[in-house]
Amino acid sequence: MKSGLGTALAIARKDLRTELRTKESINAAASFALVILVIFSFAFNLERDEFYAISGGLLWLVYSFAGALIVNRAFSRELPNDCLDVLIASPAPGWAIFLGKAVAAFLLLLLVEAISLPVFGLFYNIRWTESLGSLVLIILLATWGMTIVGSAFSAVIVNVRLRELMLPVLLYPILIPLLIAAMGGTTALFQGEPLTGENFGYIRQLIGFDAVYTALALYMIEFILVF
């Protein structure tokens, strides 16, 4: 177990170094997120209260699109020179390989979200800093759920020719419960409501989603990688 965690961290560091050197996924995801935010800022002509009611949905729509671009590269970056086959044939356990790649995708997506959030607040005049702690908690929980599911599907379709098109088709239906909770909790925070009482249900839903799909992904990844 301890050596497996060390392997996962080594793979995560390797993926982060590779991405920070090439900047392929970060540039694509960040540029896409910023362009969508600019387009949305011209697309809606709503009163302030009406806009606050959909603000969380807009933010997580952008994050989910950017997330698909990030996780799509989790395993496909290993395809040149048969690096993925070598990685699978190594003594490293499959769950450690998967966990390392999921952690790297998680950190990269958090970076894109950190770039996008101030731009979102600026363009839409959203005061997102007033409940920063609760907002960060929602972002961390929801982003982990997106990356763990997305990385699992990235492993499933890594050898599919049209994987860029297949991934969103597979990913977004599974993410519906997570996105509902993330959108609801974020909208409540933007409207000045605390995450207590009824709104705390969004946090419980995110935690439950993360726990279930993390356990499933770590269990199934051995069969996915062999297949």
Image (cartoon, rainbow, N blue to C red):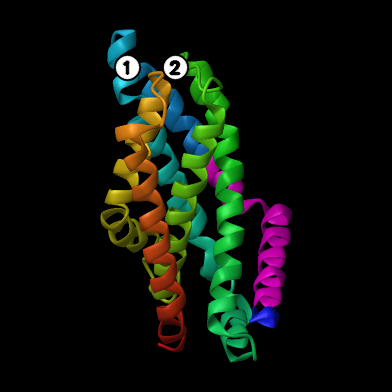
Q: Residue at x 37, y 34 (%)?
A: 185
Q: Which residue is more in the foreground, 198 or 28?
A: 198
Q: How many marks?
A: 2
Q: Check the image and report above or below for 49 versus 13.
A: above
Q: What label sits on residue 51 in the rendered view? A: 1
For the residue labelled by badge 2, is the local secondary structure a helix, a strand or a loop?
A: helix
Q: Which residue is more in the foreground, 84 or 134?
A: 134
Q: Residue at x 61, y 69 (%)?
A: 100
Q: Amino acid at mark 2?
A: Tyr
Disc 1, disc 2: CB below 8 Å?
Answer: yes
Q: Position of residue 66 (x, y in %)?
A: 46, 45
Q: CA distance from mark 1 to mark 2?
A: 9 Å
Q: Crowding at label 2, few (<14), some or many (≥20) Cα neighbours within 10 Å?
A: some
Q: Main secondary structure of the magenta part?
A: helix
Q: Is residue 19 magenta?
A: yes
Q: Is residue 68 magenta?
A: no
Question: Which quarter of the figure has residue 92?
Answer: bottom right
Sooner in the amino-acid sequence: mark 1 or mark 2 = 1
Q: Amino acid at mark 1?
A: Phe
The residue carrying mark 2 is 124
Q: Which residue is more in the foreground, 53 or 25?
A: 53
